[in-house]
Each structure stands twice: as C-alpha cells, then as structure tokens.
Image (cartoon, rainbow, N blue to C red):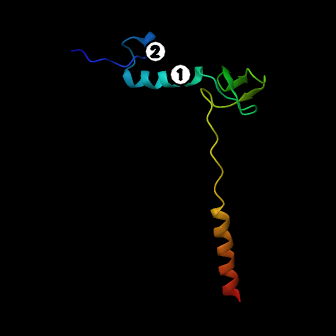
Amino acid sequence: MAEIKKKFGSVKRYGARYGRRLKDKLADVEKKSKKPNKCPYCRKLGARKLAAGIWCCRKCGSKFTGWAYYLEEKVAAQPKAEEGKAVVFKSKKSEEAA
C-alpha cells in the first residue's frame, strides 16, 4: 500500500522542487503568519500582518511592530530568587567585615 503523506497546504505550489524539509518549515511559517494573533494592547485575537514586521489589530485599530512573520509571547520576568541571593551575599560580607 502507498503511504499517506502529509499535506503541505499552501506550499504545494512548489511541486517537486526545494525538498520536503524546507517546504515543511515554510508551511509552518505561513500557517503562523496567516492566523490571527493576540494584540499586545487589547489582548484579543485580532492582530493581522500587514507587511513584514508591521501588524494591525482589527479589534482596537492599533498598529505596531513585531516579529517579521509571527508574533511571539514575551518571556516572563525572572523570579525574585535572585534578589534573595543578593541579600544573602551582602549579609556574608557584612559578617566578615565585623
């Protein structure tokens, strides 16, 4: 029996050219860029790509810049454990000086 292959979607237009891996990557980027993303201002799914790096929210009407092909969520801030380490380090120095 023939094996069922993955559908490429919009990258089928390239036919047998450019290889499977490259077409997989391109299909992933195109899928992410065409879906509505979360607007950083109103937090609703309405941000659409106008051009490379230029985005517009259809809900609140704001224009903003971002990644070229899709928006990514920002990384969360570092936990406050680092501040605790700094306090412990300062207390050790003060003990040695005394």
Q: Residue visible at 69% across and 76% down?
A: 90
Residue 79 percent coordinates (x, y): 64, 57
- When asked about the image quadrant of residue 94, the answer is bottom right
Q: Position of residue 50 (x, y in %)?
A: 68, 19
Above or below for 75 versus 34: below
Residue lying at the far left in this picture: please name it: 1
Instruction: Provide the secondary structure element on which disc 2 rests.
Output: helix
Q: Residues within 10 Å of mark 2 (few under 14, many from 20)?
A: few
Q: Residue furthest right?
A: 61
* Mark-to-mark CA distance, 1 and 2: 9 Å
C-beta proximity under 8 Å, tags 1 and 2? yes
Return the mark for residue 9. Answer: 2
Residue type, numbered disc 2:
Gly
* Rendered-image quadrant of the N terminus: top left
Front-most of residues 88 and 44: 44
Q: How many marks?
A: 2
- Work out whether 73 lies above or below 80: above
Among numbered discs 1 and 2, the one appearing first in the sequence: 2
Q: Which residue is mark 1?
A: 31
User: Where is residue 81 shown, x and y percent of the image?
Assistant: 63, 63
In the rendered view, would you say 96 is above or below 67?
below
- In the image, residue 38 sits, relative to residue 91, either above or below, namely above
98 or 76: nearer the viewer: 76
In this view, the residue in front, 45 or 19, is: 45
